[in-house]
Image (spheres, rainbow, N blue to C red):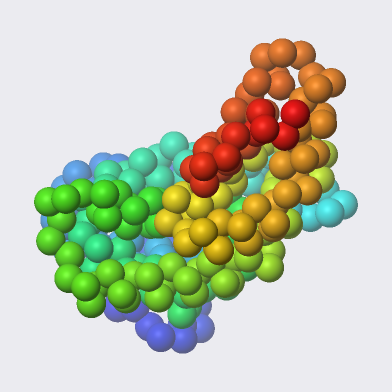
């Protein structure tokens, strides 16, 4: 595989392959035939090129066109179905030092405030942060105080980068037609790892969206309202609250 360059003038060949549907579809098959070190290499290449992946680079929301072009939506959906589960299977067993290394690369090499506004960017960050949280819950995990300290510093950096753009990460201003499940899931993942002070800041960052969802749900059919409120509650319950408390 081509080496990773610090400041590449053109996309890595692997990233170029992933810009095609066949490349995305091949990832599950490729992962079955390579070892963990090779899987980590592929994941590292993906992580440091996140903001030039077609499913992120072409998927930024535009105020004049809240819905992405059909071709882009199809590629995002394919990546979600073929690539994300494959990566999740590897990350789900990764030790904390691997997760810290990957998150560190994201923070150092990628525009976090940009990728967080895309479905795939949010999915990647959710995978990494949630794995670190699960490791913390596992009493059998052998993690040194130094490793935990490093992770906490990385999480705090990620939080500080994400916080200013929290009001803008939702798919559209129209709560009624938005599809924000992955965003509420990401916020829940950040919430369970946050300090009480950070949890308050998260609430402040998305309070307008929470209240707008509660209000619009009163006008929706029962099943749609339950789905909308259930998504918000992914986040609210992660930080010890409940949307029902808001009336």
Taking depth in this image into account, of 217 and 50 the one nearest to the observer is 217
Q: Is residue 49 left or right of residue 97?
A: right
Taking depth in this image into account, of 131 and 195 the one nearest to the observer is 195
Residue extending farthest to the top is 222
The image quadrant of residue 45 is bottom left
Estimate the x, y position of residue 63 in percent, counting from the top left: 84, 54
Q: Is residue 106 above or below residue 115?
A: below
Q: Is residue 106 above or below residue 203?
A: below
Residue at the (32%, 76%) spot, across then down = 150
Residue at the (67%, 32%) spot, across then down = 245
Taking depth in this image into account, of 115 and 15 the one nearest to the observer is 115
Residue at the (40%, 63%) spot, across then down = 46
| Residue 114 makes an appearance in the image | no
| Residue 147 makes an appearance in the image | yes
Quadrant including the N terminus: bottom left
Taking depth in this image into account, of 13 and 194 the one nearest to the observer is 194
Estimate the x, y position of residue 215 in percent, counting from the top left: 82, 31
Residue extending farthest to the right is 64
Q: Is residue 190 left or right of residue 153?
A: right
The image quadrant of residue 97 is bottom left
Estimate the x, y position of residue 190 in percent, counting from the top left: 49, 55
Residue at the (58%, 71%) spot, across then down = 161
Q: Is residue 23 above or below residue 160?
A: above
Estimate the x, y position of residue 140 in percent, counting from the top left: 12, 51
Q: Is residue 91 left or right of residue 114?
A: left
Q: How many marks?
A: 0
Residue extending farthest to the bottom is 7
Quadrant including the C terminus: top right
């Amino acid at each position: 595989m081509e080496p990773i360059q610090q400041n590449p003038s053109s996309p890595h060949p692997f990233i170029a392959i992933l810009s095609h549907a066949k490349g995305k579809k091949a990832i599950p098959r490729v992962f079955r035939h390579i070892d963990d070190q090779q899987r980590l290499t592929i994941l590292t290449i993906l992580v440091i090129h996140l903001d030039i992946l077609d499913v992120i680079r072409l998927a930024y929301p535009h105020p004049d066109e809240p819905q992405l072009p059909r071709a882009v939506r199809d590629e995002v959906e394919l990546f979600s179905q073929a690539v994300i589960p494959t990566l999740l299977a590897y990350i789900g067993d990764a030790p904390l030092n691997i997760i810290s290394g990957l998150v560190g690369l994201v923070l150092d090499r990628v525009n976090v405030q940009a990728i967080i506004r895309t479905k795939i960017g949010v999915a990647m960050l959710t995978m990494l942060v949630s794995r670190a949280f699960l490791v913390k819950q596992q009493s059998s995990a052998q993690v040194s105080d130094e490793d935990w300290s490093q992770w906490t510093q990385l999480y705090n950096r990620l939080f500080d980068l994400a916080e200013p753009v929290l009001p803008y990460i939702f798919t559209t201003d129209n709560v009624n037609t938005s599809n924000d499940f992955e965003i509420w899931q990401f916020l829940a993942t950040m919430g369970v790892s946050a300090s009480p002070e950070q949890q308050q800041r998260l609430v402040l960052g998305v309070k307008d969206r929470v209240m707008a969802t509660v209000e619009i749900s009163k006008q929706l059919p029962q099943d749609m309202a339950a789905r909308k409120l259930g998504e918000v509650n992914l986040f609210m319950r992660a930080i010890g609250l409940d949307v029902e408390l808001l009336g």
